[in-house]
Amino acid sequence: MSNESTGLDAKGSARRKLIRGSFAVPAVLTLHNGGAIAATSINSSLKRQNNHPVTKYASSSDDVWFRYQLWGWVKNGAVKYDSGLWIKGADLAVYRVQGNSVWLSSNRVQRFNLQANSLDWEQKYAIPQGPDGAELKRVSHWVSLRVDRYGNLTGAGSTGTGSAVSDSCWNSFAAGMQL
Amino acid sequence: MRFVCSAGLRIEPLGDSWAAYCARSGESLQLNTEAAAVLEVLAEGPQAADEVHRTLALDSHTPLDIVTERMRDVWSELLANGLVVEVA
């Protein structure tokens, strides 16, 4: 991330202000609870997004869209695409808030087809074993998750009803619903 | 494990402290100078926690073990607030 994009001084203004010999515990305080406001406007924001649904392709890096980093088998630094890229239902359990549903159960996994930008139809209980010596790891492919107007996770890529949504939309919503 | 500032993060001086807007969470946050310094170091690119601790120790002329101790619970907080993300 560039300094220009964060607004941080390229010369390190915060670092220059550190008091010599006295490094305090870094503190992060919430100035303004976006979640509470999002909770009250969730219907309008998600409904509006679902009135004009969008589909996002997979990205090689995380961005401001609500995405999931896929799992894959990696050997000697190379992703073994023949063994598939996968979504674990257990990873999505955190989004099951206030009765909202997630299309993939916590004990299931589902393969994602990067070329088609869609989920394979079959859900499995475990990711099939990859090549000998390969390791199951998060890989550099992020897929967008789809959310319907009620906040249910319905799928990924182009699979599922609803729409791709931004991180701030979904995360504020989730935080607001847990208040 | 390496960390980097999350996409869409904005930080501006706010008096003696710092204001941050995190696009990932949609939250506005107030940071002290130490927290802003952590993000400033990470704005230069992905780094391991140990590397960040060493840089901050040098910048603040504070022994590394003290910086490491004071940073112990901070990484989880930065992650939870969406200010930083883990990268491979």
Image: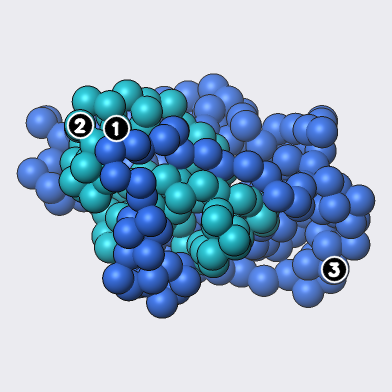
For the residues labelled 1 and 2, the Cα–Cα distance comes to 7 Å
Nearest to the observer: residue A175 or residue A128: A175
- Give the mark toward the camera: 1 or 2: 2
Which residue is rendered at x = 28% and y = 63% of the image?
B44
Q: What residue type is labelled 3?
A: Arg
**Local crowd at mark 2 within 10 Å, few (<14), some, or many (≥20)?**
some
Nearest to the observer: residue B40 or residue B3: B40
Q: Which amino acid does label 1 sit on?
A: Val
Q: What residue type is labelled 2?
A: Pro
Q: What element carries label 3?
A: helix
- Identify the chain of the residue marked 1, using the numbered disc in the image: B
Tell me if A17 is positioned left or right of A155 in this view.
Answer: left
Tell me if A86 is positioned left or right of B87 in this view.
Answer: right
Badge 3 is on which residue? Answer: A48
In which image quadrant can residue A23 be found?
top left
Nearest to the observer: residue B47 or residue A31: A31
Question: Which numbered tag is attached to residue A82?
Answer: none
Which chain gets the cyan colouring? B
Question: Which numbered tag is attached to residue B67?
Answer: 1
Q: Do the residues labelled 1 and 2 touch (CB within 8 Å)?
A: yes
Q: What element carries label 1?
A: helix
- Give the mark toward the camera: 1 or 3: 1
Give the image location of residue A52, x and y in percent.
Answer: 78, 74
For the residues labelled 1 and 3, the Cα–Cα distance comes to 46 Å
Which residue is rendered at x = 80% and y = 42% of the image?
A176
- Identify the chain of the residue marked 2, using the numbered disc in the image: B
From where the camera sits, is residue B80 visible?
yes
Indicate the colour of chain A: blue
Residue furthest to the front: A20
Badge 2 is on which residue? Answer: B63
